[in-house]
Amino acid sequence: MKPLPVIARRLCVPLVLLLTGCSQMEHLERDISSSRRAVESARDDAHRAAAYSQLGSAYSEKARYSRAFKLISAEEYERLFSEAMKGHEQAIALDPASADAYFSRGRTYFERAFLETVVNGSLVGTEASRKAWYAPAVADFQKAVEKNAKHHEAWDMLGVSYERSGELDEAISAYSQEMALDRLGRSRLAGAYCERGELHQKEKQLDAAIVDYEKSIDAGAMPDGCSCDPYNPLLTLYSGSRRYEQSWAVVRRAMKAGQWLAPDLVAILKKESGRSN
């Protein structure tokens, strides 16, 4: 099971930012109206499908925003989500070859899963229940990359969906694909390797943890308080097993990258290794 403190840290900057104010609700209503006009004025099925996707996303955003700020009842949320699904399903029916149509529906499923599984930055429910919530999003993002293997946003959301449901091996695979298409994939990959390293460390699989922490650093991990830090736990593992050359290599890499190391860990390393660098 994925350690909850890690999840909470990773969620401190949500993928979908929440805006506030009555003007936002007016903006969301305008998006729905604009999408409906686009459906009516579409000149062919491809454009009509794109407009339906836009309509589905507009309803989804209204549902997400309204529920997040407790502006609507549970029944109204379900109605808005149902309207979102109708739009997405129309889009896919009109243009089943469209990667974007599946991607848009996947985002709607993802946003609902996020609302159902994250409360105040922390995960709720069991790992199995979270996986079930994200499963429809995963299926749609997989469809999207099958339709267009260069759809980097779909690879990204596929990886994030896997990560949120605790499937780190699959997340790493998706981010590896994304990395070849977009630079965001590299930072995502660094974070996923680090999280898997923490999981291995918790399960006392120390050699596997070391490998993943090293891969995280190689991928350019830049921990900032909202992401997993591979440097300090890797230093702890190397120093604890008296692998001082590797320990000092971690110190040098952290210094070069401008990453913070716990002073007490460095002090212990100096004392036990009998050297200062």
Image (cartoon, rainbow, N blue to C red):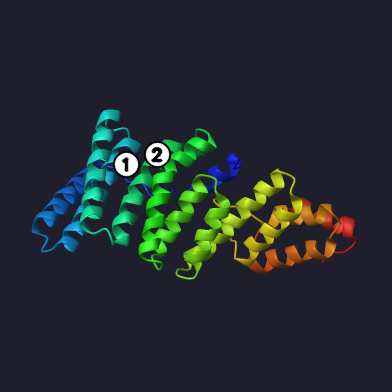
Q: SS at mark 1?
A: helix
Q: Quadrant of residue 6?
A: top right
Vertical position of residue 125 compared to residue 108: above or below? above
Residue 39 position within the rendered picture, expressed as x and y whole percent measured from the top left: 13, 55
Q: Which residue lies furthest to the right in this view?
A: 274
Left/right of residue 229 with respect to residue 239 in the rendered view: left
Asked if 111 appears above or below 169 in the picture, the reply is above
**Disc ID at residue 115:** 2
Disc 1: which residue = 64
Q: Residue at x 28, y 34 (%)?
A: 78
Q: Residue 256 in the image: state x and y as whole percent.
A: 67, 69
Label 2 to label 1: alpha-carbon separation: 8 Å
Q: In this view, does 262 lie to the left or right of 149?
A: right
| Of callouts 2 and 1, the N-terminal one | 1
Look at 79% across and 64% down and name the residue there: 246
Front in this rendered view, residue 61 or 145: 145
Q: Residue 31 carries which label?
A: none
Q: Quick check: 175 above or below 168?
A: below
Q: Which amino acid does label 1 sit on?
A: Arg
Which residue does the image show at 32% across and 41% down from the upper left? Answer: 64
Residue 190's image quarter?
Answer: bottom right
In contact (CB < 8 Å): disc 2 and disc 1:
yes
Are there few (<14), some (14-19), or many (20+) residues within 10 Å of tag 2? few
* Residue 198 falls left or right of residue 276: left
